[in-house]
Image (cartoon, grey):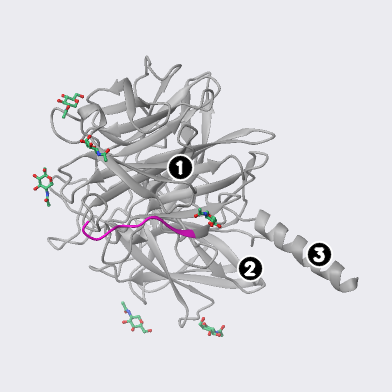
Amino acid sequence: MIAQLFFCAILLLLVLVADAKWIVPGARWRDTEGNLVNAHAGGVTLDSETGRYFWFGEYKVQGQEEGGGVSVYSSEDLATWKHEGMALRPIEGHSYISPERIIQRPKVVYSAGTGKYHMWWHADNSTYGWLLQGLAQSDNITGPYNFVNATAPLGNWSQDFGLFTDYKDGKAYALYSNGDRLEGRDVYLTSYNDEITALDQVVHRFDKYDLEAPTIIQTESSYYALMSHKTGYRPNNVVAFRADSLSGPWSQPFIIAPLNTRTYNSQSGFSLRIKGSRQTTYLYLGDQWDSNSLWESRYIWLPIQIDERKKSLEAVWHDVYDLDVKTGEWETIKGKTYYGIDSTTNGDAFKQEATFGSHGVIIAGIYGNDSTVTFSGIEGSGKPQWVSFYYQNTDDMGFGDQPGGNPDRIGGTWQLRRISSVVVNGNTSNVETLYQRDTHKGIILSAPLQLKLERGNSNTITIGGLHNGFDVKGADIDKIVVYPPEE
Ligand SMILES: *[C@@H]1O[C@H](CO)[C@@H](O)[C@H](O)[C@H]1NC(C)=O
Ligand SMILES: *[C@@H]1O[C@H](CO)[C@@H](O)[C@H](O)[C@H]1NC(C)=O
Ligand SMILES: *[C@@H]1O[C@H](CO)[C@@H](O)[C@H](O)[C@H]1NC(C)=O
Ligand SMILES: *[C@@H]1O[C@H](CO)[C@@H](O)[C@H](O)[C@H]1NC(C)=O
Ligand SMILES: *[C@@H]1O[C@H](CO)[C@@H](O)[C@H](O)[C@H]1NC(C)=O
Ligand SMILES: *[C@@H]1O[C@H](CO)[C@@H](O)[C@H](O)[C@H]1NC(C)=O
């Protein structure tokens, strides 16, 4: 009896722990086996029978960044992800899904007509010369999916692919940019036939805006179509259009995140409507591409705030938030802030006047092992905790004619990221690496790391610079925010 009670208590504890899983945009997301979640430019499909979410995305491994096929993960809470294996495996020598081909932006939808799950994606050859849409089917949501065909949508071209299902009538639509040629540069919104085996008719064409990575968010009264500009793997200011009906008229595009954050360093691609028992929440599901190593790219998932009266929406940044998919509610987790002005600088690192910094200061000159900044008196719990590092990385100083240089300079190249070392309590045998993507001047973004701090309030965190391929500069640091452990 006691043993049983004990067992129940443990189960209860496990359930509570599972419930508390938080979403940390831009962190290294790991699956239930501890591996990086590898599902880029994906889509999430809710299985209405089981209430489980299935995340499909491009599988990328180091050294081979295209042609990896489509992986699938499942989750009950959109935060804990179990790897379900490969949904679409590349086949050697296959015309359309061999490892040499492009299999991008996969999306899965259930077809009541065929009784199967249908996966659609952007199918192409390695030089984007075909611009087709691929279809594969499976009886099982996790696959394996069997290739059906790759076709030109109503005879046109199709590059970045999105799929949207209207929750009011269950009808499915494809969204696709028709490539970079002068005759293209549109985004199409086209309905599928009832079986979702082929496209039916064009519902709207976003004419000549030259956008890509489309997704649609549907509220009670509006449709918002989100798209990114075409800057390759570099992020930009994602825009949205609004309409009362899919066929339009659609509004002018507007920017969905604070200017010059480049949508918090992310690209659009998918979105989710979570209808909970208490509220409906809309999530932006973006990719934070890392063109230096695509397989290390991360995910920026954020709640979207919609103002139907103003006919606008905004993706709002949260370092750490807790989403309850059952109720639809989410809350931002509160952390404790430690400011640069109160830190200790070492070597050539220094506190520089900055109108945009907290208390008018930012820590500059972080370099290698010797020019570092240390935050002291940090409260810890003895358990792993998320820490967000607020930084600016303009990467435009001191590179001369070396690789690197100013992104705001004509013909300039720049470095995607600086890498900082993060050391807790001076223990240099445990150096964490913090990637800090480039930002505009005066724009402060945050990047998270999970750290183990000692219990009590005498921890230190020291930030230095690690080699990013060109230099050992760390980004400028504004402040750090330490979050409580998940429990
Ligand atoms: C891709 O397809 C286009 C159009 O057929 C062709 O011109 C191009 O050579 C192909 N690329 C490769 C690598 O075969
Ligand atoms: C479908 O997937 C489930 C869970 O992965 C598995 O147990 C089952 O055997 C699969 N069925 C088929 C027909 O592949
Ligand atoms: C695949 O699509 C092509 C082009 O639309 C078509 O000619 C061909 O018949 C299709 N193949 C199958 C097996 O449906
Ligand atoms: C695709 O559509 C554009 C207009 O959106 C048109 O100019 C172009 O010719 C079409 N391409 C094909 C292959 O049909
Ligand atoms: C930092 O220190 C380590 C040894 O602790 C050394 O191997 C490394 O070269 C140093 N890096 C720099 C940039 O000084
Ligand atoms: C320093 O870190 C290493 C590696 O994580 C660990 O084994 C060691 O116990 C740590 N030292 C102290 C004093 O905590």
Which of these two is toward me, 273 or 322?
273
SS of the residue under disc 2: strand
Residue 247 in percent (x, y) is at: 38, 17
Nearest to N terminus: mark 2 or mark 3: 3
> Which residue position holds label 1?
117
Vertical placement of residue 331 versus 243, above or below:
below
Q: Residue at x 26, y 41 (%)?
A: 150
SS of the residue under disc 3: helix
Can you see residue 440?
Answer: no
Measure the C-alpha gap from mark 1 to mark 3: 37 Å
Marks counted in the figure total 3
Q: Amino acid at mark 1?
A: Tyr
Measure the C-alpha gap from mark 2 to mark 3: 30 Å
Which of these two is toward me, 262 or 303?
303
Q: Amino acid at mark 2?
A: Gly
Contact (Cβ within 8 Å) of mark 2 with mark 3: no
Residue 471 magenta-highlighted: no
Q: Is residue 99 left or right of residue 58?
A: left
> Which residue position holds label 3?
8
* Closer to viewer: mark 2 or mark 3: 3
Q: Residue at x 32, y 56 (%)?
A: 290
Residue 253 in percent (x, y) is at: 34, 25
Measure the C-alpha gap from mark 2 to mark 1: 47 Å
Q: Residue at x 26, y 44 (%)?
A: 123
